[in-house]
Amino acid sequence: MRQNNEISPLCAAYLVHSRPFSESSLIVELITESHGRITAVAKGVKRKNNINKSILQQFRPLLVNWRGQGDLKTLVRIDSPTLPLPLNKTFLFSGFYLNELIIRLLTKEQPQPQIYSAYHATLIALSKELDIEQSLRQFELTLINELGHGFSFLQDIDGQDIEPSCEYCLLVDQGFMAQVNGAYLGQSLINIANRDYCDKMTKQQAKQLTRQALAPLLGNKPLHSRALFARKKQPNGQRKVT
């Protein structure tokens, strides 16, 4: 076991949230590749000439280490191998949405390498302005699955293959059950399993089912990022996508 003053190994990380701690320091929430979500003090980063002031920002790949064994660590080193990933317009708001999910749903100091990898891959996709709905849905589904609440898109709760022409309802934490006038089309579920979001119906149903699956995990407190989306309008007048 590491001693209280022993420095952790250097690991990849992203900043997902920060708040003031003192006149010169911040408390930061990080998602790390090796230790999951951690909370730490970044001492002196608010000082005008601090070298880490421009490095410690959201959506910038970081390399960090820290000391301390309690809930609140102290950052020792902050480096960045590259510039921040460029997220513009709706893609930036989508990044805020990812960060809020991380803060709300990840337990501190529980290694989640698959979630970290999915987060990193999603930020890259958003920075390249790839299909925003597919990017968000894939991250949400990875998150749901890695948190132990996943379900099959190819078989129903009775072990029967999902039929393209049938309709299904989702029993959260269990899976899909055939139901007349069910909310989900079998073909859409098969498309989602194959990461095929080419048609509008599949996109709509993927969004609906991830919201249904995330709802009990998030509880009654609304997501601030969704409220932000609702206030922002795209140039064509459409609401933002979440």
Image: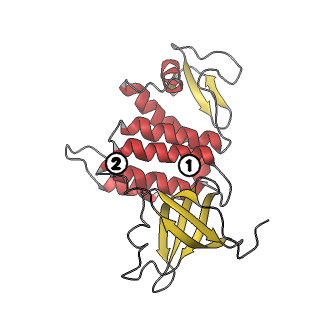
Query: 113 or 88, which is in the foreground?
Result: 113
The N terminus, quarter of image: bottom right
The numbered mark at residue 91 is: 2
Give left or right: position of 32 versus 229: right
Residue 50, how many percent across, how many down?
41, 79
Give left or right: position of 85 versus 205: left
The C terminus, quarter of image: top left
> Relative to 182, is 61 above or below?
below
Give left or right: position of 35 versus 120: right
- In which image quadrant can residue 241 be found? top left
Farthest residue, direction left: 236
- In which image quadrant can residue 180 be found? top right
At horizontal 44% and vertical 59% (from top left) the residue drawn is 224
At horizontal 57% and vertical 53% (from top left) the residue drawn is 218
Q: Which residue is mark 1?
A: 116
Secondary structure at numbered mark 2: helix
First of labels 2, 1 by sequence position: 2
Query: 179 or 123, which is in the foreground?
Result: 123
Secondary structure at numbered mark 1: helix
> Relative to 203, is 149 above or below?
below
What amino acid type should be assigned to the residue bearing mark 1?
Tyr
At horizontal 45% and vertical 41% (from top left) the residue drawn is 136
What amino acid type should be assigned to the residue bearing mark 2?
Phe
At horizontal 28% and vertical 51% (from top left) the residue drawn is 89
Query: 19 or 24, which is in the foreground?
Result: 24
Give left or right: position of 2 versus 187: right
- In which image quadrant can residue 6 be found? bottom right
Can residue 213 be seen?
no
Residue 101, how many percent across, how many down?
52, 53
Q: CA distance from mark 2 to mark 1?
A: 18 Å
> Relative to 57, is 130 above or below?
above
